[in-house]
């Protein structure tokens, strides 16, 4: 014959399992909410440095972001800053560029893969430190960008925000230099 049907309640083990599952969901989310995003205020005269992997020259510096806050990225080749109005600036550098037009087209595709679809808008920029390149605009999100090169470096600058304009990006572009 078969075994007798169990008629008791298993609420204690079920409650324990439910409590453990709840803790596994709630505790990490709670801890993450308590950990602040690491941002460092940028002084008015500060220069920010980003470094590409590879051969020298591999480092560029820029300013024009006094009063902004720099976010920690853990990536030497990129800097992310938050403006006083909430706009976001991302500056990244790659090295080893031998064909700037191809590199600029590739960087535009990378921006799209990173969530900022953009297209070149026909604008060209040149600064007094030898950087030159093209300007671009967001096609889905509000924002402007520029992809510029100097020596074997290509720098991508993206300013995202509802009121982001190229004149707001200009101080950063004008201050961009190769560090030797």
Image (tube, helix red, strand yellow):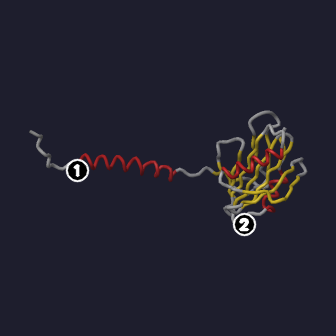
Q: Secondary structure at mark 2?
A: loop
Q: In the image, is 146 to the left or to the right of 9?
A: right
Name the residue located 79 percent from the left edge and 57 percent from the top edge: 120
Give whichever of discs 1 and 2 has the lower sequence position: 1
Classify the position of the C terminus by image quarter: top right
Classify the position of the N terminus by image quarter: top left
Q: In the image, is 13 to the left or to the right of 110?
A: left
- The quarter of the picture where residue 178 lies is top right
Label 1: few (<14), some (14–19) or many (≥20) C-alpha neighbours in 10 Å: few
Label 2: few (<14), some (14–19) or many (≥20) C-alpha neighbours in 10 Å: few
Please tell me which residue lies in front, 41 or 93.
93
* Residue positioned most to the front: 1
Q: Which residue is mark 2?
A: 163
Q: Which residue is mark 1?
A: 11
Q: How many marks overall?
A: 2
- x and y percentages locating residue 2 in the rendered image: 11, 40
Q: Secondary structure at mark 1?
A: helix
- x and y percentages locating residue 10 in the rendered image: 21, 48
The Cα–Cα distance between marks 1 and 2, rounded to whole angstroms, is: 57 Å
- x and y percentages locating residue 30 in the rendered image: 46, 52
């Amino acid at each position: 014959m078969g075994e007798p049907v169990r008629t008791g309640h298993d609420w204690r083990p079920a409650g324990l399992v439910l409590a453990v599952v709840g803790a596994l969901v709630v505790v990490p989310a709670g801890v993450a909410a308590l950990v602040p995003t690491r941002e460092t205020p940028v002084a008015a005269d500060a220069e920010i440095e980003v470094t590409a992997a590879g051969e020298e020259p591999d480092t560029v510096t820029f300013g024009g972001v006094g009063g902004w806050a720099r976010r920690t990225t853990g990536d030497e080749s990129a800097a992310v800053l938050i403006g006083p109005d909430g706009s976001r600036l991302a500056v990244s550098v790659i090295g080893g560029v031998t064909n700037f037009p191809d590199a600029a087209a590739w960087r535009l595709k990378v921006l799209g893969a990173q969530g900022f679809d953009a297209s070149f808008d026909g604008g060209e920029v040149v600064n007094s430190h030898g950087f030159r390149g093209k300007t671009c605009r967001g096609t889905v999100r509000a924002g402007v960008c520029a992809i510029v090169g100097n020596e074997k470096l290509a720098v991508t600058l993206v300013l995202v925000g509802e009121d982001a304009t190229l004149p707001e990006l200009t101080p950063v572009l004008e201050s961009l230099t190769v560090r030797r």
